Image (tube, rainbow, N blue to C red):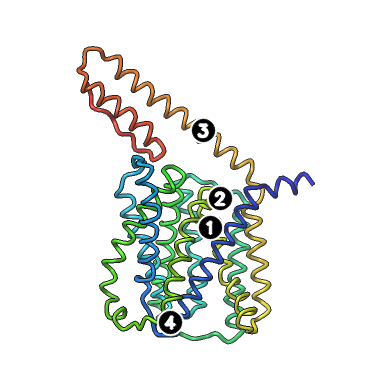
Amino acid sequence: MMIFKHFWTKRTLVGLGLGQFLSLLITSTGFSSSELAKIGINAPTSQSFLNYVLLAVVYGGVMLYRRQALKANWYYYVVLGLVDVEANYLVVKAYQYTPITSVMLLDCWSIPSVMLLTYIFLKTKYRFRKVAGVIVCVAGLVMVVFSDVHAGDRSGGSNPRKGDLLVIAGATLYAISNVSEEFLVKNADRVELMSFLGLFGAIISAIQIIVERNELKSIHWTSGAAFPFFGFSLAMFLFYSFVPVLLKMTGSTMLNLSLLTSDMWAVVIRIFAYHEKVDWMYFLAFFAVMVGLIIYSGGDKDDDQSRDEVAERSKHFDEEAGSNNINRASMAGSSKMGNDLTTSFGGREIIENKGIGKHVQGEKS
């Protein structure tokens, strides 16, 4: 009983629930894109553009209201925006060249990529339990792929090699984007992250829309086209808004594992909304992925407390170092008033930017 209580922590339950909510949002974007494709609309960059605009307007407005100083350098967000836009574009583009089964399988590349990047840059250590959870999740997704093959979904695609390379490249960029967001949301500010990701994502998407200008001109804006088009953007906005919450709670690996169930939720919708018959292996795959998620996320209480203690010690250390710098600056009685103010401002910058790891030194008196 004590083991069960330790396993089902509040963080575990909230993380699992939020992860599946995000997975459902991704499923809804997939169905929106599918409906747009059925009526001949293929403009993935334009669909993403509206999402980035919403992020910039909503969270940018909150930032302006707060009038808060930046906690991370703006050019970090430029790079993140570019990586995020191109990741979305590459994976959607891959569907034109390779079958859906290949996309589903190769998109799992983002999971080991995330684990490697977090291990190298965020110093995240994965215990055997977490590795086992990842293996079970990926095994569940492989069952989905075999289920598609078993059901006869064997469309070869026009250029499978090109499509597979696009998926791998997109999955790698997704991993870089997720790990970067995890770092920024834990060390900077969620509102700042969403504001600048939306701003620079919108700018980059607007430039890239030039490639889709002919496609946009040919769209006949009926209700059948407008509803899925704007529905996609709204679902993506909600997805991007809640992703930082899950990243801060459980990390980018858990996010990617949670999104594996999006294909299974699509199956559920096909059963109840479209009354379609699906292969029995889908249900087994869904169960396997959920078990893997529970194994991965369960019993993280001690790990979380350990990480919090380390972060707290680092925080006190940096604050003490920043205070010492300010005290040394204020003790320089022979310096001019303007230089004292500049030095004090530099000391405050050191404190504000400690989470980002960029210590801005004040001017010497």
Q: Position of residue 251 (x, y in %)?
A: 52, 51
Q: Position of residue 271 (x, y in %)?
A: 64, 79
Residue linked to disc 1 = 255
Residue linked to disc 2 = 250
Mark 3 element type: helix
Mark 1 element type: helix
Residue in the picture at 30% in, 17% down: 330
Residue linked to disc 4 = 37
Q: Earlier in the sequence, mark 2 or mark 3?
A: 2
Mark 2 element type: helix
Residue 159 occupies quadrant: bottom left
Label 2, label 3: how far apart the Cα atoms are? 18 Å
Residue extending furthest toward the right: 1
Residue linked to disc 3 = 312
Label 3: few (<14), some (14–19) or many (≥20) C-alpha neighbours in 10 Å:
few
Q: Earlier in the sequence, mark 1 or mark 2?
A: 2
Say what amino acid the circle numbered 4 marks.
Ala
